[in-house]
Amino acid sequence: MTSAHPPPAPGRELSNPPTDGISNLRFSNHSDHLLVSSWDKTVRLYDASADSLRGEFMHGGPVLDCCFHDDSSGFSASADNTVRRIVFSHGKEDILGRHDAPVRCIEYSYAAGQVITGSWDKTLKCWDPRGASGQEKTLVGTYPQPERVYSLSLVGNRLVVATAGRHVNVYDLRNMSQPEQRRESSLKYQTRCVRCYPNGTGYALSSVEGRVAMEFFDLSEASQAKKYAFKCHRKSEAGRDIVYPVNAIAFHPVYGTFATGGCDGFVNVWDGNNKKRLYQYSKYPTSVAALSFSRDGRLLAVASSYTFEEGDKPHEPDAIFVRSVNEIEVKPKPKVYPNPPA
């Protein structure tokens, strides 16, 4: 079938992409700088608007996650068990500390002034990057988790930790002695990603089985009645449902709508309040491994990077696309009420 209008381009492809799988990418809160971690053992800093590679930092093993501290520095989580601070301007890095297994997730809390890491060693650790160098001085605390940590998300003083075995722990960063809530995922299959709502009322959680759950922190009956889950990133072929992992969730900073990225190569935009899909971008060359909106929501960075869900096989090269976001793609549509009878 040929279409008179070619589908819109997937966005501008950044030059000098990572040479192996992209584990995460994140926009800065202060600029259009983009931090990217990869299995090629690097963290790369790009200026996404100018398509320029501003810095590249080699690690001792694959880098599984990264985050900004401010516009001049960031942090990384590596499979060599280290947690590192990276100073972009000086081109240097130092080790904040270590876990006993690969470090899967890293977040910086502006509220607490701490770095939070989750590892496959089944612990969460909090670090004070202002502490003198040396692990004892920077480590604030170690908090055992029920299983290996797969995903972390922060909103204000709330921290959500998703682990293997479908466990979800909710913490208040001001009192980490024990979780505020211990939950189980409402999805039957392994958790892939968790992201808090920007308004702080709950979180979205995705699984390897083409589903997303919308959850609320408030345990009252009225709030819990609002939770729901929906199917996505799947297709029917010859009467069979083919289901893909949902690797990434990113909330739009202005409208609170969110994008999901899956192993089907699609990015969908959803209005969670009205339970509607707003938009689907044309297909990316391979799995969508990570997503991030810029601070003003005008740009969306998409990691098109095979996540080995079907084992080792020939695949498209790893790439980062930066697309300009049109308001129509992300803005909730007002509900249309029928006119009352005269």
Image (tube, rainbow, N blue to C red):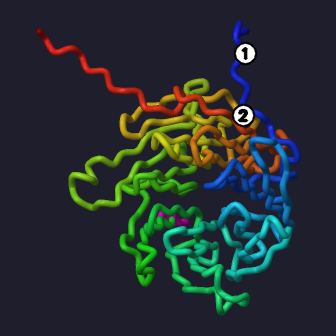
Q: Residue at x 56, y 86 (%)?
A: 140
| Residue indicated by mark 1 | 6
Q: Residue at x 61, y 26 (%)?
A: 237
Whole-percent x, y for residue 68 in the image: 67, 62
State left or right for residue 293 relative to residue 51.
left
Quarter of the figure with the N terminus: top right
- Say if 6 sits above or below 105 in the image: above
Whole-percent x, y for residue 197 in the image: 44, 52
Q: Residue at x 33, y 26 (%)?
A: 335
Secondary structure beneath dot 1 equals: loop
142 is within the stretch colored magenta:
no
State left or right for residue 170 relative to residue 321.
left
Whole-percent x, y for residue 171 in the image: 43, 72
- Residue 215, disc: none
**Mark 2: which amino acid?**
Tyr
Q: What is the crowding at mark 1: few (fewer than 14 residues within 10 Å), some, or many (at least 20)?
A: few
Secondary structure beneath dot 2 equals: loop
- Say if 130 sits above or below 288 in the image: below
**Mark 1: which amino acid?**
Pro
Whole-percent x, y for residue 284 in the image: 72, 34
| Residue indicated by mark 2 | 284
| First to last magenta residue range | 162-167
Q: Nearer the viewer, mark 2 or mark 1?
A: 1
Which image quarter: residue 134? bottom right
- Say if 30 sits above or below 7 in the image: below
Q: Nearer the viewer, residue 51 or 314?
A: 51
Q: What is the crowding at mark 2: few (fewer than 14 residues within 10 Å), some, or many (at least 20)?
A: many
Kindly report the distance in space between the C-alpha atoms of the residues bearing marks 2 and 1.
14 Å
Q: Earlier in the sequence, mark 2 or mark 1?
A: 1
